[in-house]
Image (cartoon, grey):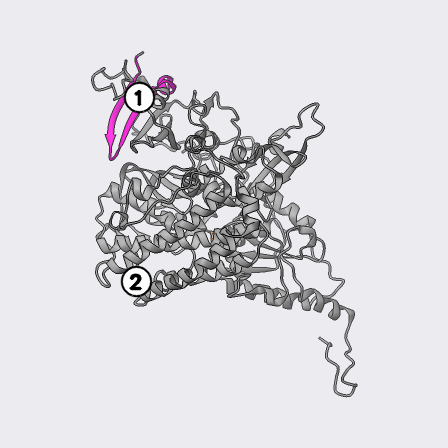
């Protein structure tokens, strides 16, 4: 199976940027590679979409990886990895609560920190600190890389160790 | 206070009103509610530690609001907690007093401009004593408790505190049509 | 209103009682709320609810400069003061390439360990309060006041000092710092046998904690718990050893672990950590130069681009931060990974099957701090 994936090295971590449809497949592969300790799931508002950043550690040799995937505002959903690492359960709920990213297959996707009745996701950049909508928060020259529209990078620089690209 | 008799009367008779007597009892046995919220709660615990030792003024924590006289709001109150805080206050028996401890309880503190923080607990419950500081030192809380003691002593027994809070702030409101959190 | 209760009665299960605990409850260490389903004394279901102290840290820090972010982080794990500042400071130093003098690193590490002792002392007092013993609280808070006095002399504030800064610390040490710390360590070593006697050797504590709330090794790792909770389950993972920072490579210490994984093991590990902190502090008192630079060169206006995750081992576990800078002087996004946040997720695992009174003991052994959980 081909995974649309880009790999780079940042400080002491391997960073994989992956197409949202392949996010789950990559995570399964990483789980097989022995990354057993979930550190956190962060979420970002990139201006062109939302980004999920999953950070993992392998307890045996303390290798660290970071998996990034970008989803568009309209879809704003990725597959949940709670069954692989139960420790991300609350992190996913928090990302859903504050950033508005849904996780398909999450066992209990409710708001975690805010009250159930609120219908906004305050960490998105279109809300200001007080929770008010800012209609045009992006400057006109905002970069728009939209990685899920880019063609998949070639196989040589894409295959991470552990053979995800096979 | 007319508590001490004048010199013409025998020394072992003290004249005063019933107000004075009951207020004396009340002010010497203020029991706060165990309700730590945030950072200030640690300093609130430190007020009852052996160094500052508020126990010596007859103040002991009670775990249920029905037995407590004083609510010390020690920390940031957010919109989710606001309803619960008001309910705890309503559960406390009269007479009851509220101490607002720290910048957060006074006006929102460092988090004032955020989307989820109530800008001052006096929007929810009537406050008797405000303590500045982030966090206030335990000595400051002790002083507030002593100030409250003086305040209780001076009060008429039939005094009824105003229950409605003068504010247009609605923390209990639902979000508006545009998805906006009702802030002020 | 299923969402607010979080526990619906099961049809046909009339023997189950649903009990709400918190957010105002003396044993929840703050504003935790747990809805518990009980069958007699046994817990059948447990649903934790958090967010009663959500203070929009992450949003409000996006509108502050990096220097203004540091005092906000203090307010997360408010029991352990300066420890929270370090991840942000380290991440920004990495991204901006700021050099830190050796002496500044040692000063930071000394404060870090002082606050670890202070935090574990607070834990000891409050955990024993939960178990019904008032005496340890009176002793531990006395000792904590000594630490806070030492901190106040140098940093200017007791609890939330805002002391670390990019490139070092804000102020040089007070001239009496070394003497104060040495005296305090002597005092603490005399006190520790008392504490062991009051807590670890206490038969009531034994009866209520041994074999209660066992967290297996695999479950602990998969749940992402860290700190004393993880080490009590037999995993020797400590950020201070795994990804060393500041002056930790230069000092010797051990990682105490226990294989039992129960509540008593978590109590025991925290005690051993106090001993290790004393050991680290004694080494650093020897090594740290009495005078010298306490701060490196750092620009007065930081402009940062790039992304960095840095973690430290605070009193509760791996406290991480994910900083994203877009080239401006304010962070584009800051995500805090609270150690207690991940640790608290194991509540359903540990509560279900335990007795109701055990729940209190289990909760106090997790040592949650809500500033860090709700942020
Ligand atoms: S006033 Fe300061 S110390 Fe007190 S709760 Fe607010 S932030 Fe914490």
Q: Nearer the viewer, mark 1 or mark 2?
A: 2
Q: Nearer the viewer, residue A142 or C78?
A: C78
Q: Nearer the viewer, residue C282 or C115?
A: C282
Say left or right for B176 vs A68.
right
Q: Chain of mark 2?
A: C
Tell me, yes or no, whether the highlighted magenta stretch contains residue A6.
yes
Vertical placement of residue A149 versus B51, above or below: above
Span of residues in magenta: A2-26
Q: Which residue is mark 2?
A: C173
Tell me, yes or no, whether the highlighted magenta stretch contains residue A125.
no
Say left or right for C32 vs A21.
right
Q: Secondary structure at mark 1?
A: helix
Q: Nearer the viewer, residue C3 or A147?
A: C3
Q: Where does the C terminus of chain B fall, quadrant-wise?
A: top right
Based on the displayed image, in which of its 4 quarters is residue C353 positioned? top right
Vertical placement of residue A62 versus B135, above or below: above
Instruction: State the image coordinates of residue C136 (x, y, percent, origin top left).
Output: 52, 57
Instruction: State the image coordinates of residue A14 (x, y, percent, origin top left).
Output: 27, 29
Q: Which residue is mark 1?
A: A147
Q: Where does the N terminus of chain B fall, quadrant-wise?
A: bottom right
Instruction: State the image coordinates of residue C40 (x, y, percent, origin top left).
Output: 68, 35
């Amino acid at each position: 199976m081909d995974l649309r994936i880009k790999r780079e090295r940042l400080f002491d971590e391997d960073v994989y940027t992956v197409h949202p449809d392949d996010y789950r497949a990559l995570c399964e592969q990483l789980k097989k590679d022995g990354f057993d300790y979930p550190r956190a799931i962060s979420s970002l508002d990139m201006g062109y979409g939302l980004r999920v950043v999953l950070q993992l550690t392998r307890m045996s040799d303390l290798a660290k990886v970071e998996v990034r995937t970008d989803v568009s505002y309209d879809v704003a959903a990725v597959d949940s990895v709670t069954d692989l690492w139960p420790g991300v359960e609350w992190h996913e709920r928090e990302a859903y609560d504050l950033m508005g990213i849904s996780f398909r297959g999450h066992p209990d996707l409710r708001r975690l920190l805010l009250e159930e009745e609120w219908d906004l996701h305050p960490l998105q950049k279109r809300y200001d600190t007080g929770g008010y909508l800012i209609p045009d928060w992006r400057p006109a020259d905002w970069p728009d890389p939209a990685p899920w529209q880019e063609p998949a990078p070639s196989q040589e620089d894409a295959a991470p160790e552990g053979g995800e690209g096979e | 206070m007319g508590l001490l008799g004048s010199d013409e009367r025998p020394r072992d008779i003290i004249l005063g009103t019933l107000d004075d007597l009951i207020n004396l009892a009340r002010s010497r046995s203020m029991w706060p509610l165990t309700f730590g919220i945030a950072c200030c709660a640690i300093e609130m615990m430190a007020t009852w530690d052996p160094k500052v030792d508020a126990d010596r003024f007859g103040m002991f924590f009670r775990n249920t609001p029905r037995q407590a006289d004083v609510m010390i709001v020690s920390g940031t109150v957010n919109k989710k907690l606001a309803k619960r805080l008001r309910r705890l206050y309503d559960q406390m028996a009269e007479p009851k007093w509220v101490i607002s401890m720290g910048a957060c309880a006074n006006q929102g503190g460092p988090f004032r401009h955020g989307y989820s923080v109530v800008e001052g607990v006096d929007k929810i419950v009537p406050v008797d004593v405000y303590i500045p500081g982030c966090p206030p030192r335990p000595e400051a809380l002790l002083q507030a408790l002593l100030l409250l003691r003086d305040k209780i002593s001076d009060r008429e027994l039939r005094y009824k505190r105003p229950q409605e809070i003068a504010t247009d702030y609605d923390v209990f409101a639902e979000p508006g049509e545009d998805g906006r959190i009702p802030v002020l | 209103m299923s969402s607010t209760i979080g526990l619906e009665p099961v049809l046909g299960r009339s023997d189950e009682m649903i009990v709400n605990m918190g957010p105002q409850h003396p044993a929840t260490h703050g504003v935790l709320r747990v809805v518990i389903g009980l069958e007699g004394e046994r817990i059948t279901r447990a649903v934790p609810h958090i967010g009663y102290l959500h203070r929009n840290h992450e949003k409000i820090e996006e509108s502050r400069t990096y220097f203004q972010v540091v005092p906000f982080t203090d307010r997360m794990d408010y029991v352990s003061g300066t420890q929270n500042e370090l991840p942000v400071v380290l991440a920004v130093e990495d991204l901006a390439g700021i050099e830190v003098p050796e002496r500044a690193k040692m000063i930071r590490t000394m404060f870090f360990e002082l606050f670890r002792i202070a935090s574990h002392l607070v834990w000891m007092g409050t955990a024993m309060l939960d178990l019904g013993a008032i005496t340890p609280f009176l002793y531990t808070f006395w000792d904590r006041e000594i630490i806070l006095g030492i901190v106040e002399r140098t940093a200017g504030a007791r609890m939330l000092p805002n002391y670390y800064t990019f490139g070092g610390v804000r102020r040089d040490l007070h001239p009496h710092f070394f003497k104060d710390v040495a005296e305090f360590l002597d005092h603490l070593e005399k006190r520790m046998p008392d504490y062991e006697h009051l807590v670890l050797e206490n038969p009531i504590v034994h009866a209520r904690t041994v074999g209660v709330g066992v967290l297996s090794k695999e479950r602990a790792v998969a749940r992402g718990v860290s700190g004393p909770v993880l080490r009590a389950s037999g995993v020797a993972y400590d950020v201070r050893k795994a990804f060393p920072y500041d002056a930790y490579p230069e000092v010797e210490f051990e990682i105490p672990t226990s294989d039992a994984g129960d509540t008593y093991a978590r109590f025991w590990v925290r005690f051993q950590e106090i001993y290790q902190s004393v050991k680290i502090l004694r080494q650093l008192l020897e090594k740290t130069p009495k005078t010298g630079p306490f701060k490196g060169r750092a620009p007065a206006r930081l402009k940062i681009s790039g992304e960095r995750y840095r973690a430290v081992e605070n009193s509760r576990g791996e406290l991480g931060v994910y900083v994203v800078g877009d080239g401006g002087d304010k962070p584009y996004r800051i995500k805090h990974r609270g150690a207690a946040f991940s640790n608290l997720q194991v509540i359903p695992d540990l509560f279900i099957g335990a007795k109701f009174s055990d729940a209190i003991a289990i909760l106090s052994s997790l040592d949650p701090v809500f500033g860090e959980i709700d942020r």
